[in-house]
Amino acid sequence: MKKRYRTLSVGILMVCGCLATSPAALQAQVHIPGPSGKPIHDKPVTKVVNKQIGEAGNDTGFDMAPETTLEVVQAAVKAIPANLAKANGPFNPTWASIQEHYKVPAWFEGAKFGLFMHWGLYSVPAHQSEWYEKHMYGDPGTIKWHEAHYGPQDKFGYKDFIPLFTQQNFRADEWAALFKASGARFVIPTAQHHDNFAMWDSKVTPYNAKQMGPKQDLIGELCTAVRKVGLKFGVSNHGIENFQFINPPQAMLEKMQAERADLFDPKWEGFYHVADRSDSACKQFLVNWYERNVELIDKYRPDILWFDNGIDQRYLDPLKLQVAAYYYNRAKEWGKQVSISSKKAAFAPEGTNIHTTGSILDFEGRIPSGIRTGEWQVDSKIGSTWGYTKDMTVAGAGKIIATLADVVSKNGTLLLNISPTADGRIPEDQKKTLLEVGQWLSVNGEAIYNTHNWIKFGEDGKTPVIRYTVRGNSLYAIILGEWPKGKILLPALAKTGRLQGAVGTVSLLGKKERLGFNWSEKGLLVNLPVEAPSTYGNVLKISGLTMNGSSWTGSGNPISD
């Protein structure tokens, strides 16, 4: 295909809370081969959306997806090696076929709490964020910081962090034991972040943890250890966002290009994807992205394959449908229930995320303001950054438990992100939080696991905050914040015609004694002990009322009115 030269600059905008380069600002003069066509981005959503349940579509314009065209994507699909293009099974790479055969895994419905992790090369500098690679080549402050600590980028580039990513203290069995003790039911480590470094033993990319850096199959070791303790194991792949992740300033580009250094070093061009962003280079990149996913699928049989924002645009549909069909057919062969998880409307061909097809919807750090039926999750970080940084602050168990209760009361699942270090440790403050969350769940997990939403998710306003969940015929009221010594009134349980049945018993999880109560038109007034059994949140179990049924849907989409 005919090449057009794309130009680069350092104009910036905010994407997912981080700095990202805007294509409108790509106005420098260094000649970098760029795509020959103009991407047709998704049209903005113009209909009125239900914000209470987080209904939304894909962002318009550049949002981490490769700036390419449908024709290039279709050419990449045709170039996929025949032996990898499709696994035997009922799924074909069409929305209709995926919709017909897909069902949310039954194990996910009751899991409610999983662990995510940003684990990669960015933990070596441990500065700024997990987007360090982008910022060390684009953000003036980070450029200077990098030069002061490591030298100029043409002498010490991002690739030079690979030997320093040693993981010498990584012990997969110890990590798995911690994850089990945290109360999590599944684990999703980063197999590859935006920086293009594969954390597994790969045959389709040389830039991997088995051949470089730690010289270990990190994903493989963790997969074995996690499954040994009875947890589900998934992988996240952010790799499609690598193609245009780095956008350096003019002077840096000119110098590196002239010297064939770092970003323009022929040995590393396929790692950075800066020197050539032509249609042919993008096609090759997309084929390799597909091959990496197939390799992850076949080697580790993940229970969840999680994708970041980069796959959202509609022009990428042919490629992600090919991945979905392959994955789901392979899972049929294995006899496993699996799912892709994606954001926004990436797997919602009609344009909004209430009609997702073949994927569990993920909200990044944002909890819907109201109850959303069906199946969905929120990925939320334990600290101030997703990847490990030296000055990150870490939330205590109380905050995490409150977030978990809020998500579950609205019918969702919490995917809590942790941040391992470059030498293979999970920092002590993160361990402490995880263990305390696990201790809380050992007493109160009955109100979290295998639950669904009630008719109201909670009581807000003055402390304490209340969150409700349902399991079987029991209603749980999770009391968060300062313990109300003496009595607590639950106005949502007012004795009116909208509630069926009658309150029979009230007890406190962790205590054997039943509690006294008065049920009236004002609500349920419960007598409480002076001392709370738990430091961070306490749960009342209420029986006798007729509970609403499960909000699970096979598609994962909200129940239609």
Image (tube, rainbow, N blue to C red):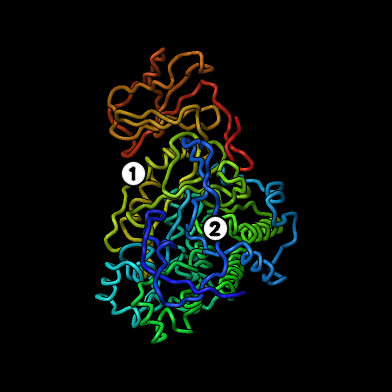
Using the image, determine if residue 485 lies above or below residue 207. above
Determine the residue located farthest toward the left in the rendered image.
Answer: 148
Element type where label 1 sits in the image = helix
Residue at the image position 39 percent from the left and 26 percent from the top: 513
Picture disc at residue 311: 2
Question: Would residue 399 appear left or right of 246 to someone viewing this image?
Answer: left
Determine which quarter of the picture holds residue 558. Answer: top right
Question: Where does residue 333 sit, x and y in percent of width and height?
Answer: 71, 58
Question: Where does residue 366 sit, x and y in percent of width and height?
Answer: 42, 45
Question: Would residue 442 appear left or right of 312 to someone viewing this image?
Answer: left
Question: Where does residue 89 sit, x and y in percent of width and height?
Answer: 75, 57
Residue at the image position 37 percent from the left and 34 percent from the top: 538
Element type where label 2 sits in the image = helix
Badge count: 2
Name the residue nearer the viewer: 348 or 24. 24
Label 2 vs label 1, nearer the camera: 2
Determine the residue located farthest toward the bottom in the rendered image.
Answer: 259
Using the image, determine if residue 466 lies above or below residue 196. above
Q: Residue 94: tell me if it is visible.
A: yes
Using the image, determine if residue 407 lies above or below residue 79. above
Picture disc at residue 399: 1
Question: Where does residue 404 sit, x and y in percent of width and height?
Answer: 42, 42
Name which residue type carries label 1. Answer: Lys
Residue at the image position 51 percent from the left and 21 percent from the top: 545
Name which residue type carries label 2. Answer: Ile
Name the residue nearer the viewer: 300 or 137. 137
